[in-house]
Amino acid sequence: MDWMNQAAISAQKSDAVFFYVFGLSVAFLIFITVLMIYFVIRYSKKRHPKAEQIEGHVGLEIVWTSIPLVLFLSIFYYGWTNYEYMSQAPRDAMAVKVTARQWSWSFEYPNGKQSKVLFAPLGKPMKMEVRSVDVVHGFFIPSFRLKIDAMPARTNTTWFQATKPGSYDIECTVICGVDHSLMLSKVIVVPEEEFKAWYFGGEEAPEPGKSFRTAEAHPDLQGLAPGLAVLTAKGCLACHSVDGKPKVGPTLKALYGKEEQILIAGVAKTIRVDDAYLRRFITNPMDQQVRGYPPAMPQTALTEQELNDVVRYIKTLN
Amino acid sequence: MSTHAATAQPSYLVDTGSRKGLMAWLTTTDHKRIGLLYLYAMSIFFLIAMGIGFVMRLVQLTSYQKLITAQTYNALFTVHGVIMIFLFVIPGLSAVFGNFFLPILIGAKDVSFPRLNLASWYFFMAGAILAVLSLFTGGGAPDTGWSFYAPFSLKTGTNVSLAVFAAFVLGFSSMLTGINFITTIHRLRAPGMHWFRMPLFCWAVYSTAWIQILATPIVAITLVLVILERFFGIGVFDPAKGGDPLLYQHLFWIYSHPAVYIMILPAMGAITEIIPTFAKRTIFGYKAIAFSSMAIAGVGSLVWAHHMFTSGMSGMALMLFSLLTMIVAVPSAVKVFNWVGTLYKGSIDFQPPLLFALTFIFLFCIGGLTGVMQGALAVNVHVHDTYFIVGHFHYVMFGGTGMAFFAALLYWFPKMWGRMYSKAAIYASWFPIFIGFNLLYFGMLILGLMGMPRRYYVHLPQFHTMHVVATVGSWFLVLGLLLFFGTLLYAILWGEKAEDNPWGGVTLEWSLPSPPIQENFEEIPTITHGPYEFERLEGKS
């Protein structure tokens, strides 16, 4: 099964503890269940008409307090020492800045290269410096058994050393808004030479691991209208269509000049969408919500140029 | 009413005051009626939240996603969590059976503060109404999950403020009930009812009440801070204003982890009453069970940060909280051994309450053991915030508290309404409940290990098969629950008259008529022996 896929040393460390606890748990559960069923049958009213009034047994109480205590402590110790290994990055690890935002991931490598999926060389330690620019997110790679929360104004770290080439899911695990379940990415683990070719190659160096990547949503921004390119890159189109199709948020088609009801602190007001309103909607979406849509739009940092492009593009949709 | 027909005292279900019908119930100070008021209200909330859960499972059959948007889905799991936690499992067995049976079990005529008791119910209902209002006013139903993590809960435009205020009001209901129960146990025990002669359910309610009093104010303050932050931007939790989101998580879990023990301790107490009655023998290890309740309440207050193992806390904090989490598992294990020990050399009369009590032990063990798995740090970093957690806490909260609630309901039903249900129909409902439960929640455990994060509207294709299994399980479960509730509802209205002591129990409630009279006892009994002395009963008969 897929979840048995151990693709990093951390996965081996985590699974070793898991199977230790799992084995003990199954033994305990079977023991208790069989004993319960046996007693219910053996000491049924029919077979055992007169109950014996046994008030307790101090020796037994001590035994069944201390044995679980010792086992639980062994689980704690094993879990803790393996976690120490999983959380302490070796010094030679390559540090990658992981940035979470509603609702996407981005990765920045020591030499300044950036990517939307995480590229990692096989068998080399990679340190993740995870942070968020808005709300709390969770950075999770199931095949590596690794997770660390992405907090605003705080950098959390974890690390991994991949043991198998391939493409593995990255998922957000902390509820962060309407498109929480679409906040996905991939780790692409490739042989070191392939990684180096991309890492040290110039702007045009091809991204590694093409063979692992099926037709992913990785839109080619070349050749799009500048405004549309911004909308695509920032993930706006997840909620707003440009062709009139209803989605979570209002469609951008024929939006300019349209009359909308907006809510300012709960009070409805009818306005006509113009340049100024568009800008305010985009830069401060929670200030004035459009009636009939969930108040879910995250604030997105846009440069003045990007904002101009977007507004110009929306005007062309009329 | 058979043997007591001659007594002049009417049953508590008969209106004798100046008010009749609904008004008599809404102004009652009788602890038994207040227990039923809680039960009726909570049953409705449970059914609503169950329906929401059912819809959420349908959404995971991909084609149904067309019916519900992502925003609605986020609102649904938030509302499901808020209702189930704040309006069902937290008041739970304490509010219903604690109210109804605590005074009876210690030989009292009522709780110490009967009017405060009614006020607690009104706080509860006010909180519930505010929670419902929050769904339909302002920006709509909250979409943050029931844990309201900052800074998302500060930024979202949905109606978080009102929902949080509702939880604040509900906290008062919980605290006032706790104060009432502690005072009752300290002051109103019948003559001769020493601490160690109390039935163990009372010990469980007592431990719970202390947590309610000590932990609830913390969440109340936290929730007020969230509201202040949303309206005035005071900057306690928002990092953009110099606040700390981790502080929110600490404050939230300092209450919300002990709250888990508020939910489970009275459930354990009820199981401890049921097993001796059907095994016809005294409980094994009375003091071990009593002290383990107190130990759970104590150590359980020191483990909150195990909800935050991936938040980036210091290594020392992780180590200590993982260690304490392992230690709190010990008293629960001790209880399980003592329950099973109580079956040993008993004379077991197998009846529906016992079936549900044993089901509780089985499901609670799975819940507890999966909890220990997450307590181990190396495993936690994998399963944290996945369906594994969702499966785990449904095993504890539903398989544990829920099943114990059902067991207690079946056990005390003839006493509460003076009527008996169809045992065959209850057995028939057990099979779909048990099978559906395990398909649904064990399916979730597997999904979590596969790497399925919680609170996802859309899932990746590799998770689909198990999602289908879990959804089919939810259909069985709902079917069984509807049959279960239908059977009991039928019995309340048209069931056969029940005997005063249908199960042959020896605690004080079974010495009363079914249903009990107003003020419980015509004469306060004098207690000369422990709670589970079955030999005395045999000697008499």
Image (cartoon, rainbow, N blue to C red):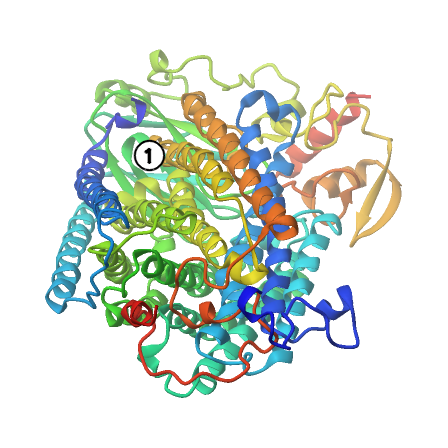
Disc count in the image? 1
Instruction: Work out whether residue B454 can be spotted.
Output: no
- Dividing the picture into quarters, in which one does residue B240 lie? bottom right
Q: Residue B89: x, y in percent?
A: 50, 56
Work out whether residue A47 or residue B392 is closer to the camera in this orientation and state it. Answer: A47
- Dividing the picture into quarters, in which one does residue B418 lie? bottom right
Q: Residue B307: x, y in percent?
A: 38, 54
Q: Residue drawn 60% across and 52% down?
A: B43
Give the class, few, some or many, for how many residues have Cα within 10 Å of label 1's Cα (few <14, many ≥20).
Answer: many
Q: Residue drawn 13% across and 69% down?
A: A58
Work out whether residue A233 or residue B377 is closer to the camera in this orientation and state it. Answer: B377
User: Considering the image in quadrants, where does the C terminus of chain B appear?
Assistant: bottom left
Q: Residue drawn 16% across and 64% down?
A: A61
Q: Chain of mark 1?
A: B
Instruction: Work out whether residue A264 can be spotted.
Output: yes
- Dividing the picture into quarters, in which one does residue B283 lie? bottom left
Image position of B333 (left or right of A63): right
Image height of A134 relative to B91, above or below: above
Q: Residue B465: x, y in percent?
A: 42, 21
Image height of B101 relative to B58, above or below: below
User: Considering the image in quadrants, where does the N terminus of chain B appear?
Assistant: bottom right
Q: Residue B370: x, y in percent?
A: 30, 45
Q: Secondary structure at mark 1?
A: helix
Image position of A181 (left or right of B115): left
Image position of A64 (left or right of B116): left
Three-letter code, disc 1: Leu
Q: Name the residue beneath numbered marker 1.
A: B449
